Every structure is written in structure tokens, then in C-alpha cells.
Image (cartoon, rainbow, N blue to C red):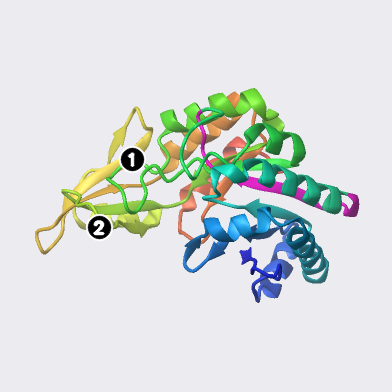
């Protein structure tokens, strides 16, 4: 994940080995650019770029140079928490990126906040124009996860009823074959009763199942959210509630991809042990590598 500085330069990365590993496995590596600074997505950094055409030109040339030097095959833009007034500025920046990269044979994609409607309010949503991104990009990643976020109350990470609400809107303005549905490969362990200002621990699906076994508790399943969960009490007497993904919940998500006729899924995040997912994936799809 690259970010950019106020002079249009890119932050530093040492990812050569990762890009080479991707190529050995016939995977197309994409450079990801964000407005991340100071430990989070930075609205002011986004505004600095999107309101300065000259700075945009500098950044785009730096991106092209890095893509060519490092051996990437495209760009994914993950700008989050942009000011609502920068919506059209973002659209125009995206047009410039596409016009510069597409003649070079490079793909352009974006990551979009999970919106249920065109004019959904909130700093996360308003500058993301589904229709324009769907028109300009080769594909978009819908970030359909994090309802059960670390700083919030216990809940399914990607409740399927909420995911479907996003898709119901998205398919009206974005071609279905351009939509990648976000899928979480993790779970969370909350202390309960939940207290404002506390944060849940992120756990892998494998870790979540092992934790249930160690505490000798049954794993339950919510039919509305199509997600497994359970509660346990630790050795110190603290109660916990855990939501995660399992073979059943990912099967429902893959069924949703097929039902809506989407391009595929986008995982967040790789590296969490979840062996069931690969087995279920292979039963459902033949992966097309480009």
C-alpha cells in the first residue's frame, strides 16, 4: 500500500519479493495508492491532491514510473474519508488517471465505501460516485465488510442482509461484470457488555474456532446475518462475544456472487489462517487468471 506526500511523491515500499512471487503464481500485481497519513486515512491530504491539478499530474507520473519499474500491471485507488465537496474533483482525477494509464495497457480500479443509495450521507460515502467509477474503471471493489468493526458493538463483520443492500444499489449503476464484492477473512473477539471506547481483538477464523473449542462452547449461527458466533467467559471471569467466518458463511457469499452475476470477490485481508475458504472457493469457481 503506497500513499503520497504533499509534493506528489510516493511513500517508500520494499515489495519487490512480493511482486515477484505474484508473477511466479500467474497473479497480476496491482499498485495500491491511498490517502493514508499519520496513522489513518487523511481527508486533508486527499483534498490537497484533488484540488490541485498540477500536483495530480506529478503524482500520476510518479505512479506510472513506479508501476513500470516495479512490474505492476495496474493501479487500485483506495481514497477514503474524502470531503464531500471533493466528489467531482475525485471523478476528474480518476478520468486523468484512466487517460494516462489505459494507453499503457494498465488496469485502473477503485475501492468504494459500501453505499445503499446515491446520496448516502457521511464522510466515508459522499465523495464516492458509484456511477462514474463504474463507467471509468476496469472494475471496482465494494468494501462490503466492517459492520462489526473493532471500535463498535459486537456484530457480524459482513452480515449478508447488509451486503445485499449494497449490491441492490450497486448493480443499478455499475455493470455487474465490474463489481468485486468485498469478503472478510477475519473475525473479532469483543469483551461484553461492550463499553464505548474499547476495541475488539481481531482473530483469524481458525483461531476463532480453536478458541471456542478451548472454552468448550458451542458455535451458534445467525440465520439473518448468515454468520457464526459464540460467547464465552475467560479465566479472569470476563465475558466475550466472537463473530467470524466459516465454511457456511463463505458459501452464502459465493452464492450471492453467482446470484448477482458479479465479477468476483475481493478478500480483506490475506494472511489469516482460514483453510475452509480455499476448499469452498474451489468447489464454487474456476479462477480466471489474467
Q: Left or right: where does residue 233 sit relative to residue 198?
A: left
Whether residue 282 appears in magenta in the rendering, the answer is no
Residue 139 found in image quarter: top right
Q: Position of residue 91 (x, y in %)?
A: 70, 42
- Whether residue 240 is visible to the viewer of this picture, yes or no, is yes
Disc number placed over residue 228 in the picture, else none: 1
Between discs 2 and 1, the one toward the N terminus: 2
| Mark 2, residue position | 198
Along the viewing direction, whichever of 258 and 78 lies nearer the viewer: 78
Q: Position of residue 93 (x, y in %)?
A: 73, 49
Per the image, label 1 sits on a secondary structure element best described as strand
- The mark closer to the camera, 2 or 1, is 2
Per the image, label 2 sits on a secondary structure element best described as loop
**Residue sitting at 67 percent across and 31 percent down?**
131
Disc 2 residue crowd, few under 14, some 14–19, many 20+, Cα 10 Å: few
The residues tagged by marks 2 and 1 sit, at their Cα atoms, a distance apart of 22 Å
**Residue sitting at 63 percent across and 23 percent down?**
172
Disc 1 residue crowd, few under 14, some 14–19, many 20+, Cα 10 Å: many
Along the viewing direction, whichever of 288 and 64 lies nearer the viewer: 64
Q: Left or right: where does residue 203 sit relative to residue 23?
A: left
Does 266 sit above or below residue 7?
above
**Residue sitting at 65 percent across and 76 percent down?**
14
Magenta range is: 103-116
- Whether residue 290 is visible to the viewer of this picture, yes or no, is no
Q: Position of residue 225 (x, y in %)?
A: 37, 32
Amino acid at each position: 500500500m503506497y500513499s503520497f506526500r504533499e509534493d506528489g511523491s510516493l511513500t517508500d515500499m520494499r515489495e519487490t519479493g512480493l511482486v515477484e512471487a505474484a508473477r511466479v503464481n500467474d497473479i497480476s500485481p496491482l499498485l495500491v495508492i491511498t490517502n493514508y497519513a499519520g496513522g489513518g486515512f487523511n481527508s486533508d491530504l486527499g483534498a490537497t491532491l484533488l484540488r490541485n491539478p498540477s500536483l495530480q499530474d506529478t503524482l500520476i507520473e510518479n505512479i506510472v514510473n513506479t508501476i513500470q519499474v516495479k512490474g505492476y500491471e495496474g493501479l487500485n485507488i483506495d481514497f477514503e474519508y474524502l470531503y464531500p465537496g471533493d466528489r467531482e474533483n475525485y471523478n476528474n482525477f480518476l478520468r486523468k488517471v484512466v487517460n494516462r494509464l489505459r494507453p499503457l495497457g494498465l488496469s485502473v480500479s477503485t475501492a468504494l465505501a459500501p453505499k445503499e443509495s446515491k446520496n448516502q450521507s457521511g464522510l466515508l460515502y459522499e465523495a464516492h460516485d458509484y456511477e462514474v467509477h463504474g463507467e471509468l474503471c476496469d472494475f471496482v471493489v465494494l468494501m462490503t465488510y466492517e459492520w462489526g468493526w473493532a471500535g463498535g458493538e459486537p456484530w457480524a463483520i459482513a452480515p449478508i442482509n447488509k451486503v445485499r443492500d449494497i449490491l441492490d444499489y450497486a448493480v443499478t449503476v455499475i455493470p455487474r461484470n465490474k463489481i468485486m464484492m468485498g469478503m472478510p477473512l477475519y473475525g473479532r473477539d469483543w469483551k461484553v457488555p461492550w463499553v464505548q471506547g474499547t476495541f475488539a481483538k481481531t482473530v483469524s477464523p481458525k483461531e476463532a474456532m480453536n478458541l471456542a473449542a478451548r472454552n468448550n462452547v458451542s458455535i451458534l449461527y445467525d440465520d439473518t446475518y448468515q454468520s457464526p458466533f459464540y460467547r464465552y467467559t475467560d479465566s479472569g471471569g470476563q465475558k466475550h462475544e466472537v463473530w467470524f467466518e466459516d465454511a457456511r458463511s463463505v458459501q452464502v457469499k459465493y452464492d450471492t456472487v453467482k446470484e448477482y452475476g458479479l465479477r468476483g470477490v475481493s478478500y480483506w485481508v490475506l494472511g489469516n489462517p482460514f483453510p475452509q475458504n480455499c476448499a469452498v472457493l474451489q468447489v464454487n469457481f474456476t479462477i480466471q487468471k489474467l
